Image: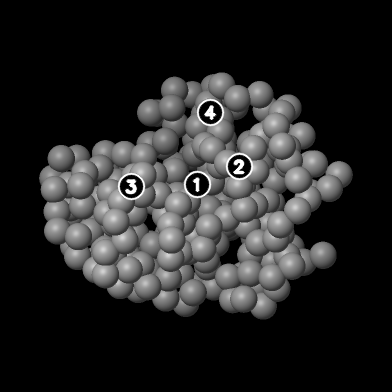
Amino acid sequence: MRPPRKRAQAIALGRARDHRVIVPLAFELAARIAARPLQEFRNDPTQLANGLGELQRAIAADGIVVALAGDMELTASGGQGLDTSAIINSNPVAASLEACTRLRQSYGDEIVLLAGLTGPATLARQFGAELGAACDCFGELVKAFCSAGVDVVMLFEEPGFTEEDIWKSGIRTADNIARFHQACLLAWRSDSVPEPVKLALDAPSVDGSGFITTDAVVAQDADIELLRAWVARTRGA
C-alpha cells in the first residue's frame, strides 16, 4: 500500500478514488497528552509538534490535524483587523505553520497533515470585512499552510452561510492553490465543495473512500482508547 501522503496526493489529483485516508478531527486532545494548557500548547510550535506527534503514535491514524479553525485567525490578528501578513506571522497561526514544517520533515510521506481553516464568510463576519478581502485572506492562508507541508485544508464556515458568487470565486482560487501543491481542499459543510466521509466515534466503518474523519471535533477530554479503536476499526482491523 502507498504511504499515507502518497494516497492523499493521489486522491487530491483524482487519480485514486478507491484510496482511503483516515484523519480524525483531534487537535485539543494532543494538549492533554502533552500535559499543557491548551492556550500555551497552541501557541508553542515545539509543544505542538511534539504533542501532535505523540497523539499520532498513540492512535496510529493516517494523519493528524495541525490547526483547527475556531478563533485561530482572529486571535492571531491581535485585534488589528484582517491583515493577512500579520495573521500568518503571529500565534497561533505561526505556531501551527512551524509545527507543520517540523512534522513534515520528521515524518515525510508517512503522515498526512490536515489544517482546519476558518472560511471566508466567517472571516468576513469575525473581522467586519468585505467578503472579497476575506476570500483573499483565506487564499493566502491556504497557500501558507500548503507551502508548510499540509495535504488537506478543511474549510469551516458557520452554519447557514450563503455561498455567494464572490465566495465561490474565492474558493475556486483557494482550490487551485491547493491543487498546485498536490493538496486537497475540502469543506466541513458545503453545497459546492467536496466534503470528507464523516463517521461517529461509536460507529466506525470500512465503507466509503477518500478522506475519512470523525463526524465532530474530538473533545480534549475524549477517551484516547476509543479514538484508537475508531481508527483501527475504520481501517478494517
How far across and how far down the image is residue 33, in percent? 59, 27
Secondary structure of the residue carrying tag 1 is strand
Helix, strand or loop for disc 4: loop
Q: Mark 1 points at which residue?
A: 66
Q: Distance between the residues labelled 1 and 2?
A: 15 Å
Residue at 42% over, 75% down = 176
Vertically, is 39 above or below 93?
above
Q: Position of residue 152 (x, y in %)?
A: 53, 59
Q: Residue 49, how many percent across, how many down?
A: 53, 42
- Please give the label number shown on residue 148: none
**Label annotation for residue 160:** 3
Amino acid carrying label 1: it is: Val
For this view, does 48 lie left or right of residue 91? right
Lower position in the chain sequence, tag 3 or tag 4:
3
Q: Are marks 4 and 2 in contact (CB under 8 Å)?
A: no
- The kind of residue tagged 2 is Thr
Mark with earlier residue (4, 2): 2
- For badge 4, the amino acid type reads Ala
Classify 37 as above or below 56: above
Point 39% across, 62% down: residue = 142
Q: How is the image coloured?
A: one colour
> What residue is pinned by disc 4?
219
Tell whether 120 sits left or right of 201. Answer: left
User: In terms of sequence position, does the residue under pointer 3 or pointer 2 come before the other?
Assistant: 3
Residue at 31%, 39% in the rendered image: 71
Q: How many marks?
A: 4
Alpha carbon distance from label 4 to label 2: 11 Å
- Residue 205: x and y in percent read 76, 45
